[in-house]
Image (tube, grey):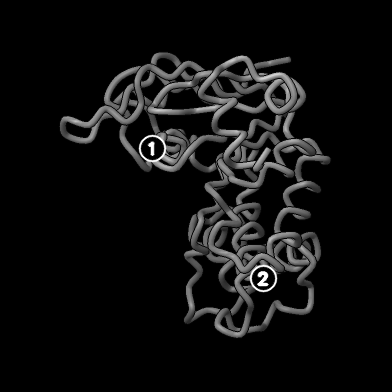
Amino acid sequence: MSEKVKVINLVKTFGDNEVLKGINLTVNNNEVVVIIGPSGSGKSTLLRTLNKLEEPTSGSIIIDNVDIANKNADINTVRKNIGMVFQHFNLFNNLTVGENIMLAPVELKIEDKKAASDQAKRLLETVGLSEKFDARVQSLSGGQQQRVAIARALAMNPDIMLFDEPTSALDPEMVGDVLQVMKNLAKNGMTMIVVTHEMGFAKEVADRVVFVDDGQILEQGTPDQIFEHPKNERLRDFLNKILNV
């Protein structure tokens, strides 16, 4: 399998606080990698460095053969290929659902309004919201807004999708719809890196699960290896607490 993302000895500090302590991680084309770990372990910071929402302190982040940690790298070109979905939906309340999805492709002159509109309608169908094109954002439930946020990220035709705890702000009954959209993306071969507390999703969808604690990768493997045969004591302790075993 060809490498899509390669992280080499990534360090991130905030003042005296070293949040990432030499992370090494490879993600292959069409692979779904799920990152788990306790709150405050550095998971979201790791994800945010992958499109330079956080500036790495040192190390390399090679995406499509470009080291985006290099100060001279054209991050905007690389970013066009990376979709990101956040914990909070970050939609524009003054725009309709369709306008939210069309905004970036039109503003960046990737598509004209007609093509962007057609694509937005297709994407809304993909996320199960085809009837919401003209709806106001405020009229949607949290789960619907998150699905619109996924459609908006897909509108740039990314070849990598980053998900930062996309269901943690949702009411429990809304989580399933969002996870289903993500499962469908995975089934269709999207390269995905997902930070989540949804262990069922990790077991079902991940090709590889990565356990992060205290800014380090302590163990990684298939869902079976991680959940059924964990080697690391800290991982075993984490799973016992989170799965109530």
Q: Which one is nearer the viewer's eye here, 157 or 115? A: 157
- Identity of the residue drawn at 75% across and 24% down: 228
* Amino acid type, residue under disc 2 in the picture: Gln
Residue at 49%, 62% in the rendered image: 88
**The C terminus: image quadrant:** top right
State which quadrant residue 190 falls in: top right
In the picture, measured across the screen, residue 91 lies left or right of residue 134, that is: left
Compared with 97, 46 (above or below) is: above
The residue carrying pointer 2 sits among few (fewer than 14), some (14 to 19) or many (20 or more) residues within 10 Å by Cα, namely many
Tell which circle, 1 or 2, labels the residue nearer the N-terminal end.
1
Per the image, label 2 sits on a secondary structure element best described as helix
Q: Position of residue 31 (x, y in %)?
A: 71, 28
Please tell me which residue is depicted at 66% across the width and 41% down the height of the picture: 243
Which residue is label 2 attached to? 144
When the figure is inspected, residue 3 is found, relative to residue 239, above or below; the finding is above
Viewed as shown, does residue 88 lie left or right of 242?
left
The quarter of the rendered structure image containing the N terminus is top right
Q: Nearer the observer, disc 1 or disc 2?
A: 2
With 118 as the anchor, is 157 left or right in this view?
left
Which of the numbered marks, if any, corresponds to residue 235? none
Q: Nearer the viewer, residue 94 or 163?
A: 163
Disc 1: which residue: 52
Please tell me whether mark 1 sits on a helix, a strand or a loop: loop
